[in-house]
């Protein structure tokens, strides 16, 4: 029996989880479209793909907040794969919404623009890219949309309100979308890592006012971040979950990754609210 042809489309593939997933899935035989914003990342990944002989890894520029560019990328992919989409044996299309960054700061001190920009990339960007590829998945009666969420999509945390909001929103959207698409054999899954050792931490915007009334909270957050680094997962840990979802016949809604991901799940499901508030009150 001929093996199913699989296409993986990855946003935010310039570094970290996205880059690792692009290279790994291409090595596993997927036709990969790795998208990213930064020109230097485009050149670097193209060079690495060429060095590894990965002719099935295609690198495209994409800003997920630009709807016209999303349409252009979709049209290019469909144009290159047209014969496969119109043939009897439809390919399995796997979309991995990975593009994102983190805003850290006390809610009082963050600008409204910080929240809007966070939502534009982490939430509305994922919606826009998902909507671009939903029609062909529905028509072919198969597909996977994998949302790279976070343990912070399950539990709130001090100084993380903007990032929390974007991931909580992504979780709600994805669960609702899953129920809409199940009759069409299209599965939406959420990947919820805890800390991951990637360049994502360098993309966190962290503007701490010198005389902030929240300085003690910032200091405690620094300690917590250092502790998190010691138990952080790797990008490959997340990539293996992505592959598992792509290969599964009936993928689940949620997949936790690492200690932080599982702790977020346990806390959201079983920890009494009074206990959580007591911890934050007296830390």
Image: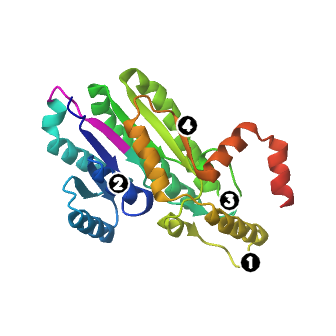
How many marks on residues?
Answer: 4
When the figure is inspected, residue 17 is found, relative to residue 70, above or below; the finding is: below
Pointer 2: what residue? 24
Q: Which quarter shows the C terminus? A: bottom right
Pointer 3: what residue? 107
Nearer to us: label 1 or label 2: 2
Asked if residue 90 lies left or right of residue 34, the reply is left
State the residue in front, 22 or 283.
22
Please rate how many residues cluster around mark 2, counting C-alpha atoms within 10 Å: few if below 14, some from 14 to 19, many from 20. Answer: some
Asked if residue 133 lies left or right of residue 253, the reply is left
When the figure is inspected, residue 258 is found, relative to residue 135, above or below; the finding is: below
Query: Any magenta on residue 90?
Result: yes
Pointer 1: what residue? 211
Question: Residues under labels 4 and 1: Cα distance?
Answer: 36 Å
Question: Farthest residue in the bottom direction?
Answer: 210
When the figure is inspected, residue 72 is found, relative to residue 2, above or below; the finding is: below
Query: Any magenta on residue 276?
Result: no
């Amino acid at each position: 029996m001929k093996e199913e042809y699989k296409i993986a489309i990855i946003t935010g593939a310039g570094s970290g989880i996205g880059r690792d997933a692009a290279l790994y899935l291409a090595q596993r035989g997927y036709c990969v479209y790795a998208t990213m914003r930064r020109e230097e990342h485009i050149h670097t990944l193209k060079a690495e793909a060429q060095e590894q002989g990965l002719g099935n890894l295609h690198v495209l520029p994409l800003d997920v907040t630009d709807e016209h560019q999303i349409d252009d990328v979709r049209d290019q992919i469909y144009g290159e794969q047209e014969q496969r989409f119109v043939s009897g044996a439809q390919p399995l299309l796997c979309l991995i919404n990975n593009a994102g960054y983190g805003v850290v700061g006390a809610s009082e001190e963050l600008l409204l623009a910080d929240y809007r920009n966070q939502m534009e990339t982490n939430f509305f960007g994922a919606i826009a890219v998902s909507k671009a590829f939903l029609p062909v998945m529905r028509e072919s009666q198969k597909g996977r949309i994998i949302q790279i969420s976070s343990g912070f999509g399950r539990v709130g945390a001090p100084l993380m309100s903007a990032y929390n909001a974007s991931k909580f929103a992504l979780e709600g959207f994805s669960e609702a979308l899953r129920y809409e698409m199940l009759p069409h054999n299209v599965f939406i899954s959420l990947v919820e890592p805890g800390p991951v050792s990637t360049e994502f931490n360098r993309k966190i915007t962290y503007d701490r006012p010198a005389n902030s009334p929240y300085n003690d909270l910032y200091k405690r957050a620094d300690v917590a971040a250092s502790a998190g680094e010691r138990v952080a997962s790797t990008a490959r840990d997340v990539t293996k979950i992505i592959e598992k979802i792509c290969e599964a016949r009936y993928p689940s809604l949620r997949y936790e990754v690492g200690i932080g991901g599982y702790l977020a799940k346990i806390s959201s499901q079983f920890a009494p609210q009074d206990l959580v508030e007591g911890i934050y009150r007296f830390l």
